[in-house]
Image (spheres, grey):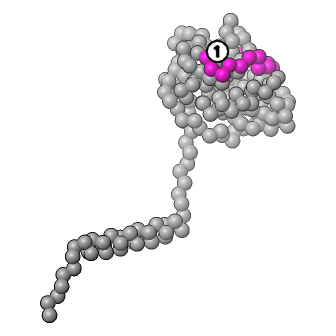
Amino acid sequence: MAARLLPSWIWVTGLTAGATVAVVFLALQADKGPHPTAAAVRPSPSASAGAHPSPSPKPTKAPEAPAASGTGRRIVYSLGQKRVWTVDAHDKATRTFTVWPGTVSPDPGTYTISRTRSATTGSDGVQIEHVLYFAAKSGLSIAFSNAADGSSPAPAAGKQTSGIRMHKADGAALWTFGTEPNTKVTVVK
């Protein structure tokens, strides 16, 4: 009796089904094993980096607000650390992040958010948003803001600027915190 050959479509179907079963089995086995995690690396803001889109980092668990920054609900800005904290009514820092200050900095002291603008053009020509004005110096209004396109600021070549810029996500969070009536800003060295 002569052996019959199976049609090629049966072979292809059988091999495909077998391969699918093997892949599903291996995937289930892999799902039961350990899962590696990648360490988050936060880019370091640098004035020399120029204007470029930057990722919105997650807020970091950084040191508590400086001890000499007052009490109660407030925004704390450290000139030396180039860092901002939001502090709740119980003196607990709720968020902290680094910023890029302009060439003109506010004097240490306590201020109140005096004016807000959802969006405008900064003195450097960059479209900005979440603008919280709180001080003035050298004829310039000093405010927190973020670039609308999420970029970090380019160096101010010979121009006086007073904006204190931050990542877009930090700008949105500071806006939410700072638009509450009578929000205080404490500037420390």
Taking 179 as reference, is 162 above or below it? above
Q: 16 and 37: which one is in front? A: 16
Which residue occupies 14% across, 93% down? Answer: 1
Q: Which residue is mark 1?
A: 162
Q: Secondary structure at mark 1?
A: loop
Q: Point out the residue furthest to the bottom here.
A: 1
The percent position of residue 88, horizontal first and vertical second, equals 81, 35
The percent position of residue 52, horizontal first and vertical second, equals 49, 27
> In terms of image quadrants, where is residue 181?
top right
Q: Visible in this render: residue 142? A: yes
Q: 79 and 131: which one is in front? A: 131
Which residue occupies 21% across, 76% down? Answer: 7
Q: Point out the residue furthest to the top here.
A: 139
Taking the magenta stretch, the answer to whether it contains residue 100 is no
Q: Quadrant of the C terminus?
A: top right
Answer with left or right where residue 1 lies relative to residue 154. left
Which residue occupies 66% across, 40% down? Answer: 60
Instruction: Specify the segment rendered in magenta.
Output: 106-120
Taking the magenta stretch, the answer to whether it contains residue 114 is yes
The percent position of residue 130, horizontal first and vertical second, equals 66, 24
For badge 1, the amino acid type reads Ser
Taking 41 as reference, is 155 above or below it? above
The percent position of residue 80, horizontal first and vertical second, equals 68, 25
